[in-house]
Amino acid sequence: MPATDFEGMRTLVVGIDGASLDVLADRGEDVVPAITDLLHSGVSGDLESQIPPWTPSAWPSIYTGVNPGKHGVFGFLRFEGYDWDVVNYTDVREHTVWELLSDHGYTSVVVNTPVTHPPSEFDGALVPGYVAPEEPACHPEGLLDELEAEIGEYRVYDDADDRNTDEEIAEGYEELVEMRGEAFRYLADEFDPDFGFLQFQQTDTAFHEHPENDAVVDAVYAAADREIAATLEACDPDVVLLVSDHGIGPYDGHEFRANSFLRDRGDVATTAGEGGMPSWSSIARNRLQDGEEGGQPDPSALERTMSMAAKVGVTSQRIETVVKALGLEDLAVRVAPTDAIRAASEQVDFAESRAYVRDRIELGVRINLEGREPAGVVPESEYESVRAELVDALSAVRTPDGEPVFESVVRREDVFDGPYLEEAPDIVVVPSEFDQYLSASLRDEQFGPPSEPWNHKLDGVVAAAGDVDDDASLAGAHIFDVAPTVLATFGLPAADRMDGLVLPVVDDVGSEPYPEYEGDDVTTEDEAVEDRLEDLGYLER
């Protein structure tokens, strides 16, 4: 039974993906009055993210309170040898706050939190968010049908292909945001939870897809603000924690193509037409909404022709050089199908390479180690010397302007610790002020303009309001601190494995051992999830 009885909801966590104090200030009180009130009525400040500061790894760190070396998710992909799969909830190998609260007799409602599909058993309800398929399994079983019967259609992703004007684009985002709030309030009424976790993803998506369009971004934030206001009024929580997984802002630096750099050093071997990273097929785009499962389409005649051309050295990178010289880039983009370009691309041959970048957002270089990888080429006896050599080489890289690309290049054990350390990249690279764009793509040139004008920054936002000490300072707050703080609002100790500290807005009641995590692996069967990640720039062709 609960250690303490609360009337109604004790604690609500509102997650706003990609928000920061600067982003919220730019919106202003006219756009986000409810959020502004939370910032000013309680205590607020910067919330430092982790390395890497990206959705699939950072949200699990928020709801478990541990670093990726302890929960096991470093990016959107997990690797087994040279094979890969998109991560899902079974890859998060640590207890969540709602599971720990359930063990103490408390009920939770969780809506749209990333990397929570397929959900686990606990006392309460959960509707998964980002990287779930379009019709996700929910907890309890059958919940999605019940939810749609009560509030109407519920989607995880936007059906935006036929939206062209600012108004149409904003309307699509607003629909998703409203679905989150309506679903949460319905479930809160049904389950009468002690704890709630409501997350909004579109606040990040809008910046990735329309970074310079204030009308669209403002519409998304205004919609999230309305849903937050309605949820606070309906649920009246004692404690509200507003948190983001990272910040977001413009990139003024360069794109650094790490695999091009490693190729030119002789570390990366390449292949053309086949092999390398998987083909993120544009034909498969939108399968998520349609509910279709995996399987690559047969290559077209053009793809086969381009692939054969690549094998004799006529790669799309070489074609790109000529096209640029002739000033025909726009025409080429309109005419050439993406799959045909991909078929002709020079790609990383992972099995033959010495070291490479697999997934740009995990911010790291992986070494093709003998005995660990299926066709490893670096002997174990040379591992440390090769790693030291690569650390020195990457640390010395300068942009065309003469500035360091990275503010730090370190061994993985200098950043992570825990039972899943061995799954991390061997070398971790941190771009200077997150103003340089790290890319895993292969091009003739090592540098170019950033593929996205806006991207993630290290500082997000945190606010605490309600039954909290609003004279406390949140200086130094970190995303690892959210989970132990949630437990403390219930008078519960943190798990002794947690890396965070209780924020001083509530009393710290210490820590104690919690049961070890046990779980099963499940593969991600929906290829359209991968297409969504590519659309947002997280996976590269």
Image: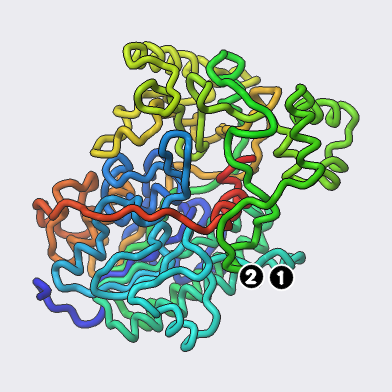
**Residue 330, placed above or below residue 345:** below
**Residue 168, placed above or below residue 486:** below
**The C terminus appears in which quarter of the rendering?**
top right
Observer able to see residue 254: no
Q: Amino acid at mark 2?
A: Gly
Residue at the spot 34% in from the left edge and 55% down from the top edge: 90
Residue 239, position in %: x, y? 27, 69
Camera-side residue of 244 and 214: 244
Residue at the spot 31% in from the left edge and 62% down from the top edge: 464
| Distance of label 2 from label 1 (alpha carbons) | 6 Å
Mark 2 residue element: helix
Disc 1 target residue: 168
Camera-side residue of 271 and 434: 271
Residue at the spot 28% in from the left edge and 72% down from the top edge: 108
Residue 332, position in %: x, y? 84, 40
Camera-side residue of 239 and 449: 449
Observer able to see residue 361: yes
Q: Is residue 351 left or right of residue 331?
A: left
Q: Is residue 520 left or right of residue 511?
A: right
Q: Is residue 8 left or right of residue 327?
A: left
Residue 502, position in %: x, y? 20, 53
**Residue 271, placed above or below residue 214:** above
Badge 2 crowding class, 10 Å Cα cut-off, few under 14, some 14 to 19, many 20 or more, is some
Whether residues under marks 2 and 1 lie with C-beta atoms below 8 angstroms apart, the answer is yes
Disc 2 target residue: 172
Badge 1 crowding class, 10 Å Cα cut-off, few under 14, some 14 to 19, many 20 or more, is some
Q: Amino acid at mark 1?
A: Glu
Question: Most extreme residue toward the right, as rendered?
Answer: 326
The mark found on residue 65 in the picture is: none
